[in-house]
Amino acid sequence: MKFFCLFIFLSLQTPLMVIGDRRLIESTCKATPSYSLCLSTLLSNPKSSSGDVSDLGLIMVGATKVKATQAIQHIKTLYRVHPELRHSLNECSQVYMAVVKADVPSAVQALDGGQPKFAEDGMADTAVEAQACERSFSGRGQKSPLTQMNKDIENVANVARAIIRMLL
C-alpha cells in the first residue's frame, strides 16, 4: 500500500513539474526580443525542462555556437562556388571563428562562474560579429549570400543576451 501511495504521489507531481518548467520557459521567452525563436530553441532541448534561467541561457549560448559553426561550414562551400567573394568570406570566416573559439566559450565560462555580465558581453559581441560579416559584403558592393544566416545568428545571440540579462 505504501508503494502504491508513493507511486500515485510521484505520478501527480511529474505533470506539475513539467507545467512549472514550461511556465519558466514561456515567461523567460516573453522577456526576449523573439518569443517564438526563444520558445522553439529551448523546447527543442530536453535540458530546458529541468533548468533554471542560467541553464536556459546556456542552452541559447549553445544554439548560437551551432549557428556560427553552420555558417563557417557554409562559408567553406561558398569559397568554391563564389571565388569572387573571397575577401568578404574571409572576413566572415574570421568573425565566426572568433564567435566559436572566444565569444561562446567565454559566455559559457561566465555563466558557469556566476558572472553573467561577461556572458552578456560575449553574446553582444556575437551579434556585432554577425553584422560585421554582413557589412563586409555591402562595403564592397557585393550581395551577401549569408544574409539569412547572419540575421539568424544575430537573433539567437540577442535572445541569449536577453536571457542572460535576467541574471544581472
Image (cartoon, rainbow, N blue to C red):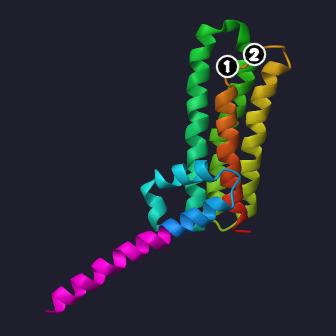
Tell me residue 147's x, y (percent).
Answer: 70, 26
- State the residue lying farthest toward the left: 1
Quarter the C terminus occupies? bottom right
Image location of residue 163, percent across then percent down: 66, 60
Q: Which residue is mark 2?
A: 143
- Dot 1 falls on a residue whose secondary structure is loop
Which residue position holds label 1? 145
Q: Residue at x 72, y 7 (%)?
A: 84
Magenta stretch in the rendered image: 1-21
**Residues tagged 2 and 1 counted as in contact (Cβ below 8 A):** yes
Percent x, y of residue 126: 72, 42
Residue placed furthest toward the right: 139
Q: Is residue 11 above or below residue 90?
A: below
The tally of labels here is: 2
User: Which quadrant holds residue 65?
Assistant: top right
- Estimate how packed mark 2 is, as few (under 14), some (14 to 19) or many (20 or more) residues with alpha carbons within 10 Å: few
Which is more toward the observer, 164 or 22? 22
Q: Is residue 104 visible?
A: yes
At numbered mark 2, what does the secondary structure look like: helix, strand or loop? loop
* Closer to the camera in the image, 65 or 7: 7
